Image: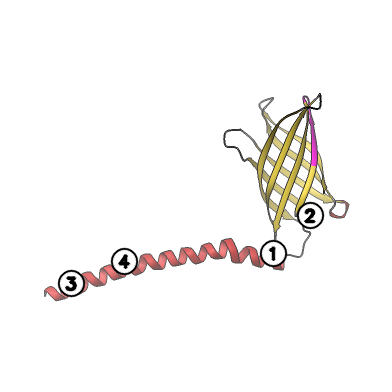
Amino acid sequence: METNSINISFSIVIGVISGVLTTMLIFFIGFVFKKFLIPWYQSITYRGLDISGQWEYEMKHSNGSDAVTMNLRQKGHNITGKDKAIVIDNKGKHTKGMAFKIRGLFFDGYLIAYLISENRKERGCGSLTLQVIKAGLKMEGYISYYDVEFNCVTSKKIICIRK
């Protein structure tokens, strides 16, 4: 009788351990598919325009302007990158800079993306809706963002030029 209860306990422990290991293996396989195999497949089958690279634009405001450089990476329809702005006052002096992470999608000639400040101690976010024009040499559209100077959300028309 004692041997039978030990065998049952052993079977339960083995079942629980194998269930946990199987669950971990399934999650690992899902992670590999989502992070590596699907993006790789999308990048080799994607036949649309490639907007990867450096783009520059300027935004004018009441106290000067922002000279902005976007560096975009594209994998299929998915876009990631960085947006770095140098704030220039009305006297031409560089006052500060801000950096943002870019995440978005590129479909049918349109970039739809959001920007989040890289510095968690600074408030900053925005969104881009841009259309590719001039055979892929420019993108034109709007940026909407939180304006720290006026404490409101605003939008501006921008023209990005590929460098």
Relative side of 142 to 37, left or right? right
Residue that mark 4 sits on: 16
Counting residues from the N terminus, which is met first, the one under dot 4 or under dot 1? 4
* Residue 28, image x, y percentages: 48, 64
Circle 3: is it few (<14), some (14-19), or many (20+) Cα within 10 Å? few
Q: Nearer the viewer, residue 148 or 92?
A: 92
Q: Quadrant of the N terminus?
A: bottom left
Q: Amino acid at mark 3?
A: Ile
Q: Amino acid at mark 4?
A: Val
Stretch in magenta: 57-63
Q: Amino acid at mark 1?
A: Ser
Q: Which of the 4 image quarters holds residue 117?
A: top right
Q: Is residue 91 magenta?
A: no
Residue that mark 2 sits on: 109
Q: Tell me the number on the disc at residue 154.
A: none
Separation (CA) of disc 3 from disc 4: 15 Å
| Element class at badge 3 | helix
Residue that mark 3 sits on: 6
Q: Which of the 4 image quarters holds residue 39?
A: bottom right
Separation (CA) of disc 1 from disc 2: 17 Å
Counting residues from the N terminus, which is met first, the one under dot 3 or under dot 2? 3
- 11 lies above or below 134: below
Counting residues from the N terminus, which is met first, the one under dot 1 or under dot 3? 3
Query: Residue at coordinates 52% horizontally, 62% vertically from top-left?
Result: 31
Residue that mark 1 sits on: 43
Separation (CA) of disc 3 from disc 2: 66 Å
Separation (CA) of disc 4 from disc 2: 51 Å
